[in-house]
């Protein structure tokens, strides 16, 4: 009996020793990632992971970074914030990653911020909420435009068209709620007035009741829908069925071809703010972003044979910011890399031109957003 | 002496204490501690759920709801709006959950089988919806951060210290449950499970015992919710969600109903397995489902009871 215990103990020790030495022997640059590849937010996580894998392979094929190979350590959170916490702990403590690029949803990102802050690991988030970078956290950066910017861009367009009264309909999921809060906060700045405020659940299949109410509200000039997933497509269809002839605006949450597919010809004439990536070839030649977005679009669509989305673009930007920062820092020293990310200037990405500073860990301004209109089942730039 | 060691009350408890003491020797980093802590949290909730499901024969698919109420109450009451001490908040939350469980147990526990499962499921989902939508209070889908725990001026720092906190709670709950099962209350509960009518005829106040165990179990879940909220420092509506309820009930069924150590085994497997399978990427869910299915087909009573019977038969 005792002998057996002794043997088992010795084996366990040997195994753990092997594990420890294995970790130390590998000399790679480790980029950690946690994304919602499965589950309700998989339309975010899936293109994000594909993008990261594709470009990490590409970097390695081209000789790596600082002469070392780059290793992508990825875990699937299925959109669950509690899982995200465990996986980030694993990335930091067990995998000893040099930097983290990930967090598809705002909930998952916000849940892990205390962990990366206390572990002092640079973290580039791919989630939307403005709360991630406002107030600024020392180790946290993000690439996607915020919901506040989307609301501002939409209201700017509404104002330029001479609209006064806006009806809002939003989803009760994280994205819709946060968008609604930002929209109600900034609407006053543009001299617009909110005359209706309706909501729908993330799994609702019919929004006719809410839209009928909006239709019967007096004096509405335009309708704004904040949400992502299937909700906005249903809103658009119902809007068409009810024969509402007010302009309909969607948020950047629908900026993928999936939305046009789902909503069908009801989506004709819908306007939304989105990154330049969706336009790609349609961009004017003078645009600094054109070569970057066309290149990413072609490479992604060639490799995966599916339409590019802005979400994958956020991952591309995140990875490139990280790569540039590591090059600039000349090492993977966490404090140096963090400082290098913070001093990013004039980085041209799929989301816009990024200029970070100690006060701004996003670095995008409103010009990063374009207002698009859906015409003949495709995106068209509104000038 | 050996007879005693073979019983779960002494032998099992000693084995558990030994395992808890030896395990940290194999931990290399705080991530390992973190996983162990998650196992301990789930195991403790599963044990309390097992009292209800395995011994009293009442199904609850809403336990994550109670867990969530505990977690969120602690988060809100210790937050800057109220600034209560964590212990007070925890106890008040647990009492509130107890009252809630008591109120709903009246109509709910009249139901049986699928209807009972559906009613508790509904309760859990209502709690989850309230937590998600009342964002002025709960922070909505983005969650809420939680103040650190302080007990009489002491505050557990880091995973290693939290590990001991949760292990003490786990061992205490195992000890309590084992004693409860062997007490008159436990015998009454098992009688209810066997046949409610027979139990009534034998003079057992079935309604009283069913309510008692339901309330107790809910309060336990709430306490663990509070503790885990303080540990992770952040709560999101996921913890009160339907999936979490299902996960808890799966732990009980997989490990073995009516077995305290079965609940612990279930918690260990369901927490460790996803972490171990994560390297398989796309196959993770398939393999995970396959393992669960095979276990249920070949060991319908759950792991621990089936293995124990085999072991005992082999001995005799």
Image (spheres, helix red, strand yellow):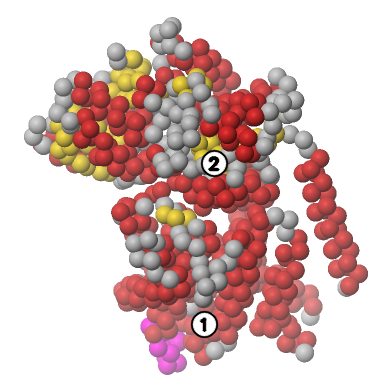
Task: Name the residue: 67% across, 37% down.
Answer: A333
Task: Give percent across and percent down for residue B16.
Answer: 69, 74
Membership of B144 in magenta stretch: no
Furthest residue to the top?
A285
The mark closer to the camera, 1 or 2, is 2
Location of residue A255 by image quarter: top left
Task: Name the residue: 47% across, 15% down.
Answer: A289
Q: Of B281 and A188, which appears nearest the observer? A: A188
Location of residue A53 by image quarter: top right
Residue B278 against residue A14 in the figure, above or below: above
Q: Tell me if residue B154 can be seen.
A: yes
Give the letter of the chain under mark 2. Answer: A
Task: Give percent across and percent down for residue B113.
Answer: 42, 69
Tell me: B7 left or right of B85.
Answer: right
Task: Name the residue: 89% across, 63% down.
Answer: A7
Give the letter of the chain under mark 1. Answer: B
Q: Secondary structure at mark 1?
A: helix
Q: Secondary structure at mark 2?
A: loop
Task: Name the residue: 59% across, 63% down.
Answer: B157
Residue B126 against residue A108 in the figure, above or below: below
Q: Which mark is residue A190?
A: none
Marks 1 and 2 share the same chain = no
Q: Tell me if residue A311 can be seen.
A: no
Q: Which residues are magenta?
A: B193-207
């Amino acid at each position: 009996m005792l002998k057996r215990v002794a043997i088992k103990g010795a084996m366990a020790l040997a195994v753990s020793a092997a594990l420890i030495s294995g970790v130390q022997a590998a000399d790679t640059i480790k980029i950690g990632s946690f994304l919602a590849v499965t589950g309700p937010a998989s339309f975010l996580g899936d293109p994000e992971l594909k993008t990261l894998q594709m470009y990490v392979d590409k970097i390695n094929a081209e000789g790596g970074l600082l002469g070392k190979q780059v290793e992508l350590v990825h875990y699937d959170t299925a959109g669950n914030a509690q899982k995200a916490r465990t996986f980030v702990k694993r990335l930091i403590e067990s995998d000893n990653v040099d930097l983290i690029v990930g967090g598809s949803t705002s909930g998952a990102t916000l849940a892990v911020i205390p962990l990366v802050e206390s572990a002092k690991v640079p973290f580039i988030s791919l989630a939307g909420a403005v709360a991630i970078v406002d107030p600024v956290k020392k180790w946290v950066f993000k690439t996607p435009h915020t919901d506040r910017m989307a609301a501002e861009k939409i209201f700017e367009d509404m104002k330029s068209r001479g609209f006064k009264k806006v009806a809002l309909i939003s989803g009760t999921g994280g994205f819709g709620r946060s968008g609604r809060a930002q929209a109600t906060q900034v609407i006053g700045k543009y001299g617009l007035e909110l005359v209706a405020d309706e909501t729908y659940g993330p799994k609702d299949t019919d929004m006719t009741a809410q839209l009928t109410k909006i239709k019967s509200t007096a004096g509405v000039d335009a309708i704004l829908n904040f949400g992502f997933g299937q909700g906005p497509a249903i809103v658009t269809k119902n809007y068409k069925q009810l024969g509402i002839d007010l302009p309909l605006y969607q948020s950047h949450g629908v900026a993928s071809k999936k939305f046009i597919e789902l909503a069908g010809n009801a989506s004709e004439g819908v306007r939304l703010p989105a990154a330049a990536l969706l336009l790609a070839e349609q961009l004017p030649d003078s645009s600094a972003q054109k070569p970057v977005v066309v290149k990413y679009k072609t490479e992604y669509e060639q490799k995966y044979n599916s339409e590019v989305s802005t979400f994958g673009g956020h991952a591309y930007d995140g990875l490139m910011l990280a790569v540039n920062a590591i090059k600039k820092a000349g090492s993977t020293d966490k404090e140096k890399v963090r400082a290098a990310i913070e001093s990013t200037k004039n980085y041209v990405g799929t989301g816009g031109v990024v200029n970070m500073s100690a006060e701004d860990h996003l670095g995008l301004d409103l010009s990063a957003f374009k207002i698009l209109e859906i015409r003949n089942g495709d995106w068209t730039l509104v000038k | 002496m050996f007879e005693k060691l073979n019983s779960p009350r002494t032998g099992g408890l000693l084995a558990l204490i030994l395992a808890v003491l030896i395990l940290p020797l194999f931990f290399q980093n705080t991530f390992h501690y973190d996983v162990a802590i998650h196992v301990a949290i789930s195991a403790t909730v599963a044990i309390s759920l097992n009292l209800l499901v395995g011994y009293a024969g009442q199904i609850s698919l809403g336990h994550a709801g109670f867990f969530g109420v505990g977690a969120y109450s602690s988060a809100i009451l210790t937050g800057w709006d109220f600034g209560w001490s964590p212990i007070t908040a925890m106890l008040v939350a647990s009492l509130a959950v107890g009252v809630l469980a008591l109120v709903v147990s009246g109509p709910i526990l009249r139901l049986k089988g699928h209807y009972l499962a559906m009613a508790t499921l509904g309760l859990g989902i209502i709690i989850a919806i309230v937590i998600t939508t009342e964002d002025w209070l709960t922070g909505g889908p983005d969650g809420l951060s939680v103040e650190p725990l302080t007990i009489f001026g002491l505050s557990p720092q880091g995973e290693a210290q939290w590990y001991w906190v949760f292990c003490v709670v786990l061992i205490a709950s195992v000890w309590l449950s084992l004693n409860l099962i062997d007490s008159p209350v436990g015998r009454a509960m098992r009688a209810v499970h066997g046949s409610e009518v027979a139990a009534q005829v034998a003079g057992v106040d079935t309604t009283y015992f069913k309510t008692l165990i339901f309330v107790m179990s809910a309060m336990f879940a709430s306490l663990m919710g509070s503790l885990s909220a303080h540990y992770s420092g952040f709560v999101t509506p996921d913890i009160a969600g339907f999936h979490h309820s299902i996960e808890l009930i799966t732990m009980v069924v997989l490990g073995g109903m009516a077995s305290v150590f079965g609940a612990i085994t279930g918690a260990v497997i369901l927490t460790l397995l996803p972490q171990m399978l994560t390297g398989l990427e796309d196959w993770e869910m398939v393999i995970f489902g396959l393992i669960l299915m095979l276990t249920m087909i070949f060991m319908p009573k759950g792991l621990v009871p089936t293995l124990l019977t085999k072991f005992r038969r082999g001995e005799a």
